Amino acid sequence: MALAFSTADPEITLEEESARKIIFKVEVPPDSRARTKDVGVTLTLIGKIMADTAQLGNAADSTAKIMEWSVVPAEKKEAYRSVTVKVKSGGITTRQYELPNAFIVDYHEDFESADGIGEFTLVLQQMKNKLADVKVTGGFSE
Amino acid sequence: MGFRVKITGGKDVEFNEGIVTGVNFISDTPENCNARSTDLSVIMKLQGRINFSLGAEVEDSTVELANWALMPSDQANCYRNVEVKVINGGQVVRQYTYPNAFVMDYTEDLNDEEGVGTWTLLLKQKKDLTDKVELKGNFELS
């Protein structure tokens, strides 16, 4: 199984080798008595932060761009981006998550001196008034 | 993966790979928001060792971290400039600069088993100056 992450405008692409884990979660308040309108869609992505030692100064991944996105203030248009995550398995896209108006809730970078690479955790949410635009598809070939 | 930390603005201190063992970059907004929040905190967690110097040959600069943590908020140098570099294979994978960082938490752990002590420092950039944080990634180590 491989994961690929991408955003449009400005473009960020993370290839299979840097994405490690994806959690797609639809949340509704647990205390509701009937189906609620208060639905939240959260996408959590955990991946690696690597350096390209063969080409000094070049990034092996685009995680630095996600770091820059994580501090964009809410007033700016770029705080919202279109995010696509593909889960590929055996030549088939088993899942494709599309969040056209995603914003960052939390972003962490963790480094340990004992590890050779770092790890990032990205928590995204779709803007709540645009929930109907979230698309989950799957089972098609490239 | 090695870490170099430079703190200026009070008594200037520098820590290298032998002292710092962990770096966490945290960009945090409230979880319960409908859209991107303006309430953005930029946090840094640093972990390291307290290397007791034999014969007090080298000054143990970590004591300055404890002094900084104890400083009352009415003093100007309770806000300091913190620069953290994450270095791997001749490349600076990350360089975080917080020009107005203050201490949120500081802990020192010492016991009779390990031979060295450990410290954990939790920092935050002053919230109205969050946009002054400088985040860079993937450039050649000079």
Image: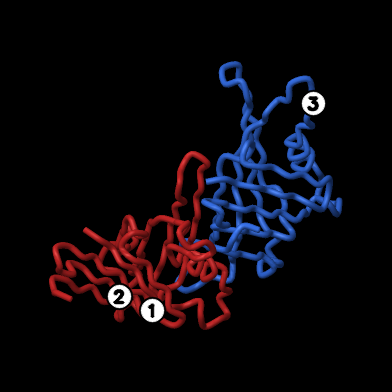
Chain colours: A red, B blue
In the image shown, does B107 or A116 lie closer to the viewer?
A116
Q: Secondary structure at mark 1?
A: strand
- Mark 2 / mark 1, whichever is N-terminal: 1
Q: Which residue is mark 2?
A: A98
Q: What's the chain of the residue with tag 1?
A: A
- The residue lying furthest to the top in this view is B112
Residue type marked 3: Glu
Residue appearing at x 47%, y 74% in the figure: B35
**Could one spot residue B32 in this view of the protein?**
no
**Could one spot residue A58 in this view of the protein?**
yes
For the residues labelled 2 and 1, say whether their Cβ atoms are less than 8 Å apart. Answer: yes
Marks 2, 1 in one chain: yes
Q: Secondary structure at mark 2?
A: strand
Residue appearing at x 68%, y 63% in the figure: B127
Look at the picture and state if B58 lies above or below A53. Answer: above
Q: Which residue is mark 3?
A: B57
Q: Can you give x and y, in whole percent of width and height, for residue B23 in the image?
A: 56, 47
Q: Quadrant of the C terminus of chain B?
A: bottom right
Q: What's the chain of the residue with tag 2?
A: A
The nearer-to-camera label among 3 and 1 is: 3
Residue type marked 2: Glu
Q: What is the crowding at mark 3: few (fewer than 14 residues within 10 Å), some, or many (at least 20)?
A: few
| Left or right: residue B83 compared with residue A36 | right
Image-quadrant location for residue B125: bottom right
Q: Can you give x and y, in whole percent of width and height, for residue B33 in the image?
A: 47, 68
The nearer-to-camera label among 3 and 2 is: 3
Q: Can you give x and y, in whole percent of width and height, for residue B94 in the image?
A: 57, 58
Q: Which mark is residue A82?
A: 1
Label total for image: 3
Q: What's the chain of the residue with tag 3?
A: B
